[in-house]
Image (cartoon, grey):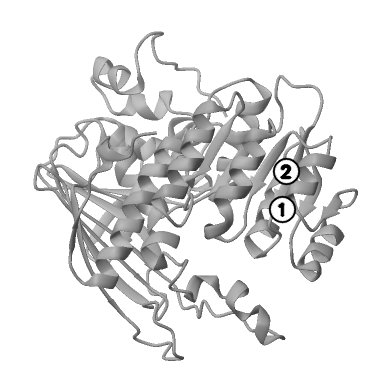
Amino acid sequence: MHSTSEPVPGLDRRDFLLSTGAAGAAILALTPEWSFASSARAEKIGVGIVGVGRHARAIMDELAKFENVRIAALCDVVDSRLQAGLRRVQGATGYADYKEMLAKATDVSAVIVATPTHTHKDIAVAAMESGKHTFIEAPLAHTIDDCLAIARAARSSTRVVHAGLYARSNPIYKLARTFFRSDSVRDLVMMRAQSNRKSNWRVAVADAKDDKALNWRLDPEVSIGLPGEFGSHQIDVFNWYLGRYPVSVSGTGSVRLHKDGRTIPDTTHATFLFDDGARLDWSGTLANSYEGQYEVLYGSNAAIKLAWTAAWMFKEADAPTQGWEVYANRQRFHTDEGITLIADATKLASQGKLKEGVGLPNPPVYYALGDFVDAIANAKPAVVTADEGLRATAISIWANQAVLKGETVKLDVESLKV
């Protein structure tokens, strides 16, 4: 979808918003790309997926929506998973070794790394060194050294290297960020986020020798826990919105439900502090799913709640009216009324279809993959660089250390030199 109203060339979106004097212009100007099906590239992009687990199956489903993409190869060390993947993707070639895939799959120009976190580095670096465009699922890696190695390889690569942090590709998050960076929210007061789901994290294994490999999330030697596996995506939201990074983190965690001998906490809490005194409280649990995953930024004029497939603005009673509210779709949350943030709201309102624009028509991973494909097809830079992947992952690794130690960890993001 495209709006007929566009920012003045040379102005960024925030300048355009401020120059118009009305937040409503942001709705007119911010018209995220809902479909990446067409591109300037005539031939299809051959994609190889390394790691064919549950999340990779979701990636396959989303890639099937792109007209200019063909899944050419699949790779997994577990043959049953590989064969299941090959049944889903007709015409793809299967490999048990990513090195063999990189050497022999000449029709693969782009690689998606969807393996366990602690195996990302070797695969991603090899893919980049072999001249492939590379998409690396977040978190980037399980150690800061591995993250740095990936970021260094990305700096040396002439191909697109995209860190799989989904928020920066999410149309609703992009729209909400424009409001956050305007006077609609104004002074930042505090921040909060959670990731709640009822899940075991333990995989049933037929053979005991496979337990360590398949249950890597519960292995203290390689796991970065809930702050890493769930928190990295959410931490990046705040990095992106604020344009700066926390300076310390404290945390606590324990096993509240899954008392099966694991040492990795199933419930955690972390508090991040910024140099101006701003505070972010993040919590995650595998013991309860209430309210799921979301982020909230509280300002003196309004609060913005982001929930991955939807977002709302809750205005304060004394906040000035800015004009765009006439187009708003509203939802009640107990005693509060939230204005649903909808991309292209004015066009939908004129067509009497405003409620149809609530939520995303595709899951968040679709838009991240779309940005990757679009960058390849049209010779554009990655929307999410490996450097940002490094920073978000490093902060989440430090947060996990704070949780395990039960103490405050100083964060020196500036020390992450690539």
Quarter where residue 156 is shown: top right
Q: Are circles 1 and 2 on residues that touch, CB within 8 Å?
A: yes
* Residue 132 x, y percent position in the rendering: 68, 33
Mark 1: secondary structure: helix
Residue of label 1? 61
Up the image or down, 310 lies above or below 267; here it is: above
Categorize mark 1 by other alpha carbons within 10 Å: few (<14), some (14-19), many (20+).
few
Is residue 132 among what the camera can see?
yes
Q: Residue at x 36, y 63 (%)?
A: 227
Mark 2: secondary structure: loop
Q: Quadrant of the C terminus?
A: top left
Quarter where residue 95 is shown: bottom right
Is residue 269 among what the camera can see?
no
- Position of residue 409 in the picture relative to residue 358 (left or right): left
In three-dimensional space, the C-alpha distance between marks 1 and 2, rounded to whole angstroms, equals: 7 Å
* Residue 96 x, y percent position in the rendering: 79, 58
Q: Residue at x 79, y 60 (%)?
A: 85
Residue of label 2? 65
